[in-house]
Image (cartoon, helix red, strand yellow):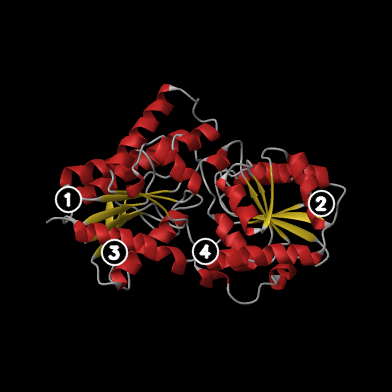
Amino acid sequence: MVSCVYPPEPMVSAQTSAQVAEKLRSRGHDVTVLTGFPNRPAGRLYSGVTRSFAKHESTASGVRLVRCFAALSPESSLFSRLLENLSFGISSGWQLLTMRKPDVIYANSWPIIATGILFLIAKLRRIPLVISVQDIYPEALLSQNRLAEGSLPARLMTWIDGVIARGSAHVIVISERFAEIYRRSRRVPPTRLSLIPNWVDESQMSGDLSGESYRATREIKNCEFLVVYAGNIGAAAGVETAIESMRFLADTPAVRLLVAGSGSRLDSCRGMAEAFPGKVLFHAPWHVADHPEVLRAANLLLLPTQGSQSLASVPSKLLSYMLAGCPVLATALPSSDLAELILRAGCGWVIVPDRPDLLAAKIEEIMNLDADELRGRGENGRSYVMRHLTTQACLPKVTEILEKLAGDRVI
């Protein structure tokens, strides 16, 4: 039996892990999934959903699904996120401790605390553990200025993360920079470390890519240059920088910004946008079914990051952006995996973070480029994703690792 542990949907770790579970089930494996109750990205339970300590369900394919209790984090504060992490770790850990012993555990869960609890239970029950690293902690907190570099909490988290990584049967990372950190800082042997990037379901963006119907619905003229941010509107998203850039484009009436998503900063972003009437539109809540038409409506897709955040995470929304066939403008550090991927694919541009004036200048520069160049950059991104970052290209690599460890286990 294989156990998969991951946070509540619609996070990318939940989406990709659900595909891992379904793929293993299709290959004849007995699979149990431990996850949370759906509440992302706003941190509020979906309509009609009630929580309990554990709720047992099953998918149409026969995957057993155990929804485990976790505290909600609508404000996305450090304390609420830690409480969410801890509570999910306890509830999912209890299920893992009391359930029939699996042959292998695949954990794509919150780092340090929840994953640490799973690690201890895996050691206690002598179960091979495979962890998937979406964000590196404490580096991600340092980049958001939520921890001080060299502080006792930062050093303690680095040590704990290293213990978990070295003690796991295998570690999967999503970028080369992540791999280097785990080889050098966490001292994970190369034989137990695999680089498998996040992937996107190629079918989600099939069909007409014009987006004209959405623009018509929102009364966005064809002559207007539409910049779109689509994703979580949270503390680390950098959406405020995007909105502030409109201050420097006040005299450029042909450009507008659409912010699509939900999150803890949605209300404050709406308040900021009141200073630029007519320049900033909002699409909230942003449902999965809305993704294609919103992304297709854009002339330019915007991916802001803050400070050194791009060194500690690779926003999964980039893959959907590229699949949409639209050029991308990111604010990120030049040495980041995010910047390297955009430049390698030839799908857009990268400028330094936290500079709304430079962001505005770059948007104005891009909107004056030849339409063929914009179209070509968008096509480059879509082509790159289809070749390297689809379910078909990446999913088998994960299931191969899990099947090998399940088969190697001595019972």
Label 3: element kind: strand
The three-letter amino acid code for the residue at tag 2 is: Glu
Q: Quadrant of the N terminus?
A: bottom left
Who's the residue at 61% across and 43% down the image? 305
Who's the residue at 46% across and 66% down the image? 393
Who's the residue at 75% across and 59% down the image? 226
Residue 227 pos. (x, y %): 72, 56
What residue would you read off at disc 3?
Answer: 57
Camera-side mark, 1 or 2: 2
Q: Nearer the viewer, residue 211 or 25?
A: 25
Is there a contact, CB below 8 Å, between mark 1 and mark 3?
no
Residue 147 pos. (x, y %): 49, 28
- Asked if residue 200 lies left or right of residue 327, the reply is left
What residue would you read off at disc 1?
Answer: 98
Q: What label does residue 340 carry, if any? A: none
Label 4: element kind: helix
Camera-side mark, 4 or 2: 4
Residue 21 pos. (x, y %): 33, 64
Total residue callouts: 4
What residue would you read off at disc 4?
Answer: 388
First of labels 1, 4 by sequence position: 1
